[in-house]
Image (cartoon, rainbow, N blue to C red):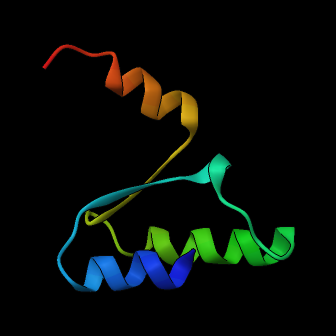
Amino acid sequence: MIATVLAAADAGAHLTVVTDACAASDEANGAAALHTMSLFGPQVTLAGTAEVLAGAEEPR
């Protein structure tokens, strides 16, 4: 997950990582990956499924 996210951010993309939809080899590695990705704001935003779905329901 982290390689894809960081490559996309490096290419200039803005993206949201749905944190509770990510898989990792173990809990500690997953937490470390999410922490690392959080350092790449504002291009990388971390959000849970409920937060993403709530934002999708807001009128534009």
Horizontal and vertical percent position of residue 60:
12, 20
Q: Is residue 8 left or right of residue 27?
A: left
Using the image as rendered, state which of residue 24 and residue 42 is in the foreground. Answer: 24
Above-or-below relation of 37 to 57: below
Q: Position of residue 40 (x, y in %)?
A: 36, 74
Relative to 18, is 16 on the left or the right? left
Q: Give left or right: position of 42 versus 3.
A: left
| 36 to the left or right of 53 | right
Query: Looking at the image, how many numbered discs can be counted on the residues?
Result: 0
In which quadrant of the rendered view does residue 26 lie?
A: bottom right
Q: Position of residue 18 (x, y in %)?
A: 53, 49
Please, is residue 15 above or below residue 35 in the view?
Answer: above
Tell me which residue sits at (60%, 52%) in the image. 19
For residue 42, which quarter of the picture? Answer: bottom left
Residue furthest toward the right?
Answer: 26
- Which residue is at a point 83% across and 76% down the rendered structure image? 25
Instruction: Give residue 1's quadrant in the image.
Output: bottom right
Residue at screen point 56% across, 41% down: 48
Identify the residue at image location x=84%, y=67%. Answer: 27
